[in-house]
Image: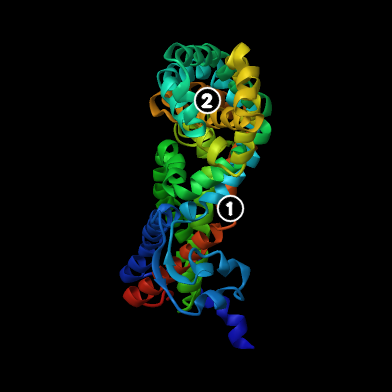
Amino acid sequence: MWGIVTLPLQIDWFFQDVSASGWIHIATIPVFTGVIGFLINWTGLIMLFSPVRFHGVTIPGFKQIARVLPRKLQEVPGFLQGGVGWQGIVPARAAKMGSIAVDKAIAKLGTPGEFYQQLEPDQIAEHIVKVFEPDMPRMIEDIMAREHPNLWRDLPSPARKAIIARVQAQMPTVVHGITREIGIHIDQLLDPKIMVIDHFEANPALVVRIFRDFGQRELNLMVIFGFVFGFLLGIPVAMIDHWFGLWWALPLLGILVGWTTNALGMWLIFEPPEPKRILGIKVHGLFLRRQNEAAEVYAQIIADDVITLERIGDFLLDGPRGDRTRQMLATAMLPAIDQAAGPVRGAVRIAIGSKKFDNIRDAVASEAVDRTITPFRDPEFSKRQADKIRTLVSARTKELPPRDFVDMMRSAIKEDEWMLYAHGAIMGFAGGVAHLLIFGVGGT
């Protein structure tokens, strides 16, 4: 009973009974927590972005064990693949970030039709004609020699040249028809979400660039504020340690300081999305303050690497809907090919048979589709057209409400932030143990 009554009287609430070594003990605690806070945020950024690819070892049977682990542990990079190691949280979630980027932002930035119109289909058609025209005679020669060599061999040279000339004369009409058909059906043929997810998954370093290119200054500030937050949080820890002198207090409070330091760092970057005043101080998420600059960087990356004319061409012909694209374009070309055959079409059909004539016509259409889309893959032309996409994405990103912008940048990693906080807690615990080992237990 007396012990309980007299205990508060033994506590040096006002630091009146502190020796020189005691002051050193007290003063070093905020310094320790500040340094630990700095290291927590510094190593936390490494955890966020590095390494780009998984580094670790595969353990036999661990893949099956990982499937029954708690869901949070399954999110640790590599676990579900049976590996123990690490991959940066951002690159590990590249595909997920791509999906959310489309849902939260790119879908709002523009429809596939709007992106396609920004690329100016008429200019695309002119470029295709320019690239395709020199190859046209060789293409017709090859097709005719393959499909009906006897007929082509027996035709007089003027007749061959006349057929080639008619086909070349029809080519601008055919090409403009193709680019027009693509524009009409682009929403069914092109899926930006699949494009973005596949590209981010194949190139996780690109996702890291999105953060690094415009947010490096803010990320550096986050590291510096790690020391500030850690130091400030260390002051009440030093007071508690002095008052109660419990050996386990520093390690346990270190866990709290480490967790809180990381949480405050993330909050500093992303919150609040709108400027607010807290205790008379204006606060605004560091990334959000530079949304316009971020929009330019984001738009540049999307236009140069993700939604490009070259990748659109690849997706149209080789993507999951490539067969549909080829069939649609080939069908659209048939009337123009018939027109190119001119008045001899009926006679040729009778001479070689309807089936053989249709085979020749289909072969020309199929070959023309491939050669028509090939100029889409011209890197130089694609780069010139990218400026239009960049302008559109930049303008729309700047118009995004701040909360949508935050969602675009943060949603993919939000579920995994607990790893950063746990990492902070572990380092905080280690810092508390280190101080305990060096300076001993506090209190009088």
The structure residue drawn at horizontal position 59% and vertical position 39%, both measured from the top left corner, is 322
Residue 113 position within the rendered picture, expressed as x and y whole percent measured from the top left: 64, 26
Q: Quadrant of residue 59?
A: bottom left
User: Vertically, is 209 above or below 162?
Assistant: below
User: Vertically, is 124 above or below 243?
Assistant: above
The structure residue drawn at horizontal position 67% and vertical position 32%, both measured from the top left corner, is 187
Q: Quadrant of residue 213?
A: top left
Residue 240 position within the rendered picture, expressed as x and y whole percent measured from the top left: 50, 68
User: Vertically, is 314 above or below 118?
Assistant: below
Amino acid residing under circle 1: Lys
Q: Nearer the viewer, residue 315 or 347?
A: 347
Give the CA separation, mark 1 to mark 2: 29 Å
Label 1 belongs to which residue? 414
Instruction: Give the mark nearest the N terminus, 1 or 2.
Output: 2
Residue 363 position within the rendered picture, expressed as x and y whole percent measured from the top left: 55, 32
Numbered label attached to residue 109: none
The structure residue drawn at horizontal position 59% and vertical position 73%, both measured from the top left corner, is 67
User: Vertically, is 281 above or below 120?
Assistant: below
Amino acid residing under circle 2: Ile
Q: Nearer the viewer, mark 1 or mark 2?
A: 2
Label 2 belongs to which residue? 389
Q: Looking at the figure, which quarter contains the C terminus?
A: bottom left
Q: Nearer the viewer, residue 371 or 223?
A: 371
Instruction: Say whether residue 283 is visible.
Output: no
The structure residue drawn at horizontal position 40% and vertical position 18%, both measured from the top left corner, is 134
Q: Nearer the viewer, residue 332 or 395?
A: 332
How packed is label 2: few (under 14 Cα within 10 Å), some, or many (20 or more)?
A: many
Instruction: Say whether residue 229 is visible.
Output: yes
Secondary structure beneath label 1: helix
